[in-house]
Amino acid sequence: MRRVLLLIATAALLAACSAETPGRAEPAPAPEPTGLALPPRPHELPLDGVDPCALLTPDQRASLGLDGDPVPYRSTAPGFAGPACSISGFEPRAVAVGLALATGNGIEVLTNSDALTDEITPITIAGFPAILARPKNPDFCSVDVDVADGQFLDVQFADGGRLPPIPQDQLCRDAVEVAEQVLTTLLSR
């Protein structure tokens, strides 16, 4: 008799556990992460209060062939909003550099976006996770460095329009070099 009662109790318990309870929502499975995963930052390097035109010293600008005066402005481009600076160079070649301090959102706007058409390659700059963005337009190349939660540094290196044009591979190497110089300055402050 005991055995029969135990079987009935076990069957009732199993039935109760498997029965659906009306009005109770089951949690949805977590969505699969999309986009490009970057390694963690070595530490936070916030951009609050940083002057983007002071991120390259006069000696650094000279070594990069940037002989024009830095011109500050405010970027309002979606995903890149924040203080910005452009610096041009004419000798030995015509080039332009743009430095934008994206302080309104993190690099995730680039790494998790299905809307990007650039060819994206993960890299590191001075130990910080970054991406090299090679756009379809061969006139420039970008490096975006993840420096703090909700902030990233955008470096663009562009051809200045002389003939023959500077190959995009060289523009990308130059964008990486500028990003390295900027991080050197940021880390020394």
Image (spheres, rainbow, N blue to C red):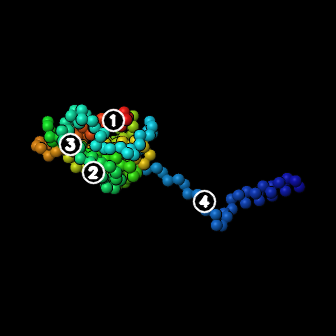
The foreground one among 138 and 79 is 79
Cα gap from disc 3 to disc 1, whole angstroms = 18 Å
Q: Are the residues tagged 3 and 2 within 8 Å (C-beta)?
A: no
For disc 2, the marked residue is: 73
In the image, taking residue 54 as reference, residue 10 lies left or right, namely right
Q: What residue is rendered at 73% in x and 56% in y? A: 14
For disc 3, the marked residue is: 69
Q: Residue 110: x and y, percent?
A: 36, 49
Question: Can residue 173 be seen by looking at this rendering?
Answer: no
| Mark 1 or 4, closer to the camera | 1
Q: What residue is rendered at 19% in x and 36% in y? A: 65
Question: Can residue 149 be seen by looking at this rendering?
Answer: yes
For disc 1, the marked residue is: 185
Q: Residue furthest left?
A: 163
Helix, strand or loop at label 3? It is loop
Q: Are the residues tagged 4 and 3 within 8 Å (C-beta)?
A: no
Q: Earlier in the sequence, mark 3 or mark 1?
A: 3
Name the amino acid type tagged 3: Asp
Q: Earlier in the sequence, mark 1 or mark 2?
A: 2
